[in-house]
Amino acid sequence: MTKQTTDPVGKSVPRIDAYDKVTGAVQYVDDLQFGPGLYYGKLVHSPHAHAIIKKVDVSKALAVPGVKAIVTGEDTPHRMGLYMQDRYIFARDRVRYYGEPVAGVVAISEEIAEQAAKLVEVEYEVLQPVFDPYEAAQPDAPLLHPDMAEYQWPPFIFPEPGTNISEHFKLRKGKVTDEGVDPEVWAQCAAIVEKTFRLPQIQHVPIEPHVAVARWDLSGEVTLWSPSQSPFAQRDLLAQGLGIPHGNVRVISPYVGGGFGGKAGISIEANVVVMAKAVKGHPVKVRMTREEEFFCTNVRQSLYAHTKIGCDKDGHVLAMETAYYFGGGGYNDYGVNIARAAGYSCTGPYSIPNVKGDSHSVYTNTPIGSAMRGFGMPEIHWGIEQIMDRLADEIGMDPAEFRRINCVKTGDTILTGMKMPAVDLVQCIDKVTEAINWGKEEPPSAPHKKRGKGIAIMWKAPAMPPNPGSSAIVRFNEDATVNVYVGAQDIGQGAFTVAAQMAAQVLGIPYEWVRVSVNPVDTKYSPYEWQTVASRITWSMGNAVRAAANHARTQILEIVAKYWDEDPADLDIKNGVVISYKSEREQPLKKMVVYGLPNENYEGWQGGPIIGSGKFMPTYVTNLDPDTGQGARAVVHYTVGAQAIDLEVDTETGEVEILKIASAYDVGKAINPDLVMTQIEGGAVHGMSSAFEGMFFDENGRLKNPSLVDYKIATAMDIPKEIHGDIVETPLEDGPWGARGVGEHVMVQTAPAIANAIYNATGVRFDDLPLSAEKIYRAIHAQEEQEQ
Amino acid sequence: MLHEITLNVNGELHIVPVKSHHTLLTVLREQLGITSPKRGCENGECGACTVLYDGKPVNSCMVLAVEAEGHVIETVESLAKNGELHPLQKSFIEHNAVQCGFCTPGMLMSAKGLLAENPHPTEEEIKHALAGNLCRCTGYVRIIDAIKDVADHS
Ligand code: FES
Ligand code: FES
């Protein structure tokens, strides 16, 4: 008999998508078959980081046999953008990063399209580029968007037209002015650390590169197949950008081969739709090569952070001043909102009474900076978590204790004036320190190695507009199996599995009776979901699924109650059977959930096919004051966590070996504990890898390392010897069963935890990422020379 | 130029016209409709396209289709027999070794190749065998556990 799991919430049931994934049955976009009518497209990329387009001549390319159409900026007159409407689908007057799409060639084969793309002649007038976000924010920097004042943006974004600053978020709390924290406060500090930190752009590196297929029917219906975290947001952007009704745009998104934020928002998809418009009726497929994936899809933004924090002699943090400059790239996708999120969370997970924070998103001549796992948080925690360590060091306090004292606690008034919802960060710190024998000095494995331990903590709120919604539908079949419909996407995190668990729990049926009918997510048939981002799905989609299942459950109980002439309140559903606690009668769900139940003597019937629908949208997020960042409720909630690392540094090579990484996160309630653990493990390795990753550009803005050989990500050989995880469960008030998300948090503080452990081992600190064996080797030896 | 070749894939012979410069990966995916080998880089750098080639794991994006004639090629589609999953597939499910799943077919074929040559590998040997298969989701931990579990119980 197949297994039947009742009451599956909180149980580690197997993933609902695993069978199809291990048999090769799962289809990703590039696996879908479109028949012989399929055309292929290639993008023509800008060879300059910053230039005026003088002329585009497609005649030679168009003459190549097999070429069907070529589109350019001429064909895309409307500006588009997720927050800032700052870009044309194909560049029109100006290019702003190396690799920006200037034209798209459609042909009968990929090879012909590629050849023809090389024949598109574009005349440029090269302009001075600017790459560094801090430089780009200066008044004399080359201006990327002279027309910024004409752009449209939502009311919670504050760009500064006439500069490259596309968002400036201001946070003012306590005794501060625009000049900074009151000098009297600084005077009370026993230790003050002030530092500048720099982080490079990094790439998501999903193993599935971006690919999109689009078809523009003669009737005006547009269909886009894309591996997308945001099918509904893509529909919205396309409808706006192309001036067509939402109902005419259909986005179909089968399984996603890794997202990490890179497949949220929109990158090449709009280009492909415009290319398809030129060859109506034919599907057009564009696949990014791995090289294009690196320079022509969105990346994590670079950051320049200047931060000053002070504490008193007992270790209480009193003041912080910080300025963040995110290198947003040529255009904004999520960029402005990342800077905003980094602004309203600028202290990291600490209660600090006096704060001046300024967070900027700055246009730079680099690939589009956008969402990546953690959304601004890994970037800002890199500096904050090292300064906290230094402060603890200066006043002679244990860094874990320092964090216990200062970290955010339930009910604290945090930097924006909001009350901190229930979390237990102290418990997370306790768990990870215990897991790595914190405070116990342990010997290295060889005389030329140095061993050290480090800790870092984090917080992150879902960063999104105040009102992103989710919806869900549950539908019963004759045998009481259920199909659950959601518009959320499974990007590997297990969203479909938890949706099935939640529906089964509410409906009182075994987990195995639930099918999740969302592959593909299809905006024509799936219920609305804002986007699968921000670690919001378990919480937001979960609430919608729970509501939909409750809606169905209520209908069932009412029908049976009427049939038995009882009160629905006395009934329950257990293991697929409606039971009465009062009369102890039983009614299986089978059949009745579709055919209903007969009246006495079959004089008529009750009920009918059961369909439940449900929705969820947070309704309580408030505006923040543009001058101070203060408001009653900045965000929906925060997830918090800690990581501690035990590592060895080889002083002869600079190589770092992580012996153990311990993570603990407060997830409210683990709907599927083992899936939470797989996020914790995968995140720890992703976080470790990110500390050693960087995109490097030459003086013309051309990416120097656009391959998996030159841009290395962690392999099976590189992983920590031991990865330990602990789950803390402090229920979230409005979370389903108390759950909150954890998908991104698992890598936010890994890089600074490593840096703190390297310091503990070697006495050397690093202000800039990426780390590398060479850099560590040099720093250790430079320090030794200094000491001699 | 077109060549008519016979490919032995998953125990079946396929007669296909292939272009000289087309890779085994392209022909498997686009002409035979065998889509489990994935296209991750087409440059031998990610392992998503791994198939068994005479029992040994290779990156099918680095093999020309014409070269593959006369060799035995296996993909994930051949692993389950009579509706029964291969022990590696079962183990991948049990250990939650799958997240987005895009690396999974390549991982499974590398694992099968490894266990055929070395039925009881150490953890280090498993890591070594997977060094060419990138996974951005799982951190490899469960994949290694899943393979080890199969090795320990065979
Ligand atoms: S696609 Fe063959 S190794 Fe990446
Ligand atoms: S499971 Fe996503 S790349 Fe391995």
Image: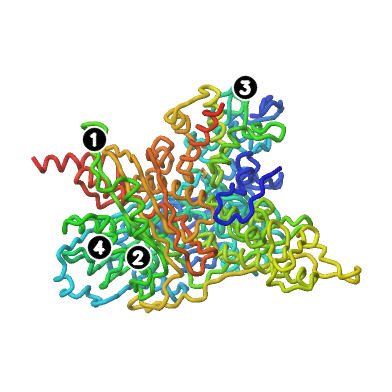
Query: What is the distance, in whole Å, between disc 1 and disc 4 at their CAs?
Result: 32 Å
Q: Are marks 2 and 4 in contact (CB under 8 Å)?
A: no
Q: Are marks 3 and 4 on the same chain?
A: no
Mark 2 or mark 1: whose residue is earlier in sequence: 2
Task: Using residue B105 as the reference point, say whether residue A293 is left or right of it.
Answer: left
Secondary structure, mark 4, is strand
Residue under disc 1 on the same chain as residue under disc 3: no
Q: Residues within 10 Å of mark 4 (few under 14, many from 20)?
A: many
Say which quarter of the image contains residue A314.
bottom left
- The chain letter under disc 3 is B
Viewer-proximal residue among A333 and A541: A541
**What residue is disc 1 on?**
A449
Label 2 belongs to which residue?
A: A143
- How packed mark 2 is, by other alpha carbons closer than 10 Å (few <14, some 14-19, many 20 or more), is many
The chain identifier of the residue carrying mark 4 reads A
- Choose between A713 and A754: the one closer to the eye: A754
Front position in the image: A735 or A341 = A735
What's the mark number on residue B71? 3
* Residue shown at 51% from the left, 44% from the top: A207
Q: Secondary structure at mark 2?
A: loop
| Mark 1 belongs to chain | A
